[in-house]
Structures are given as structure tokens and as C-alpha cells.
Amino acid sequence: MTTVEPHLSTEVLEFAATAARDAETAYRVFHETGTVRGSGTVNFVERVPGQDLAVQLNPPGPWSTETAIEPVIATFDGQILSGRGHAAFVPTFGRVFRERPEITSAVHVHSPWLGGWAQTHQPLPIRYAASQRLTLSRQIYPHLDRSVNAGDFILEKLQIDPDLVAIFEANGGSHVIGRSGLIALAKFVVLLEEGANYQAIGDTLGGSQEFDETNLVEQWSRTGLLEEARNRGLVSR
């Protein structure tokens, strides 16, 4: 489906074009790092700043000869205003954008190690230093009841975990949310996938272990999160 609305501003169109270039970079890195394999399923959704609009970015996939991504601009409810392709994830993440203005970006991604964990229907504790230092959230939650929209599930978990970074799509992939734009989100996805891999290896060697508190202090001190961690009682030091 292709529609073009003349009222879309130059700023919106330029934002969408930049997001598409960022998504192309992210998708290339995902493939080069093994973050995605096989079907190559990745769908980015980026909030248009200051408007109730989102851009969905659907990479053409490993079987396509095309590498360019055409942005699909849609309302938060999923009405397509510009671009060819689908905006199926915009209504899911649009409800998150509407209620949580700090969330800028989201991605639906099928990656092997996070996907493997999604098969277990268990939460994944974040125990990899490189990803933990970037968030105060301590786990990824499984979304089991699919009669509940994933966006509603994310909003529910944000009530108890305001720093939530991801949920598992049970028996499928992951939904990862970001607060600093598409590239920062994509970099974090790579770290989450890497951490899930390392933790799985650790489980074969006797079990991955929780952080010593001194290690959490060290990690959060590197990224400016330590004071907030102390305020929330996540560390006592």
C-alpha cells in the first residue's frame, strides 16, 4: 500500500529518511555480528519527535537483492500516511509512545540467543556487565498471554520497572525499547544478544551468577546511573 499525504512536513520526511539510513546501518551490523540470522526478522519503529506519528522501518531481508529501506510513516493507530510496506508494529509501540514520552524507539527482532531464551518462558536476568551498565532494569520479562497486546504488556511492566528495556515474545523474538534513538537502541540489542549468549555458556559451566554489589557499583558509576541506583536501593554502597 502506498499513500502520500501532502501535509507531511519537510522535517518529518527528513527525519524518516535519516531513520531509514540508520536502520540500514543497524541491519548490516546485526548481520555481521550474528545478531540476526535465518529469516533476518527486524522491524524498527521510531517516534517522530513532537508528533503523534511513527516511522516503521522494515529491512528487505536476506533473500532480497535490495538493501535500501523505504520508511513507512503512520499515525500511532497504524494509518499509513507515506511509504510502501506495512506498519503492523506501529499500533503496538504507538500506544507505548503515547503514554511514555521518554520512549523514542522500539524494535521487534528475532535473534538466536534471545530467541532461544524466549522458548523457555522464563525471565532473563541481566548479568552481562556491558549491557547492565546501560540500564537499571535487571531482567527481561516473558510475554506469555498473547491475548494481551504486547504494547499493553510493556506498559504494565513499565509500572513496576520504569527502566524496562525488553520483553520476550514467547516462542518467538523480542521487543526492545529505547530512549535515545535508533542507533543507540540497535547497539543495545547487540549487547543484549551477546549477554544472552554468554549467560547460556555460563549455564553450561555451572550457572551464570548474580553480580557482586561492588560490580554493580562499578558498572553504574561508568554511565552516571549510580546515584539513581542508590536512591532506589539497588545498591547500598
Image (tube, helix red, strand yellow):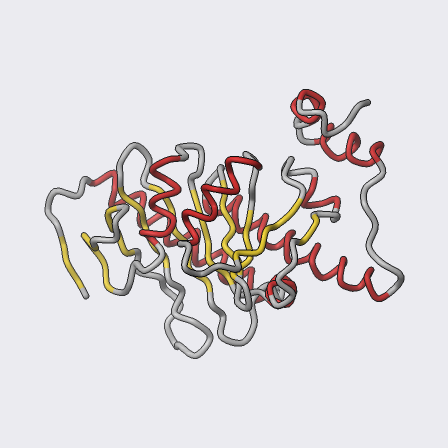
Q: In which quarter of the image is residue 193?
A: bottom right
Q: In which quarter of the image is the C terminus?
A: top right
Name the quadrant containing residue 208: bottom right
Residue farthest toward the right in the current orientation of the protein: 206
- Which quadrant would the N terminus be assigned to in this image? bottom left
Q: Answer above or below: position of 3 versus 177.
A: below
In this rendered view, identify the residue nearer to me: 98 or 62: 98
Rendering coords of residue 140 (x, y %): 61, 50
Q: Where is residue 236 in the image (x, y as percent from the top left)?
A: 79, 23
Residue in the picture at 47% in, 46% down: 154
Q: Residue at x 27, y 65 (%)?
A: 85
Q: Where is residue 73 in the image (x, y as percent from the top left)?
A: 26, 51
153 or 79, nearer to the observer: 153
Please tell me whether residue 223 is drawn above or below residue 81 in the rendered image. above
Residue at horizontal 31%, vertical 43%? 15
Position of 230 compared to 56: left or right? right
Foreground pick, 42 / 157:
157
Give the residue at x 64% y 38%. 134
| Label total for image | 0
Q: Answer with left or right where residue 222 lies relative to residue 97.
A: right
With 99 as the anchor, is 126 left or right in this view?
Answer: right
- Between 72 and 121, the residue placed more toward the observer is 121
- Percent coordinates x, y for residue 149 in the rendering: 40, 54
Q: Residue extending furthest bottom? A: 63
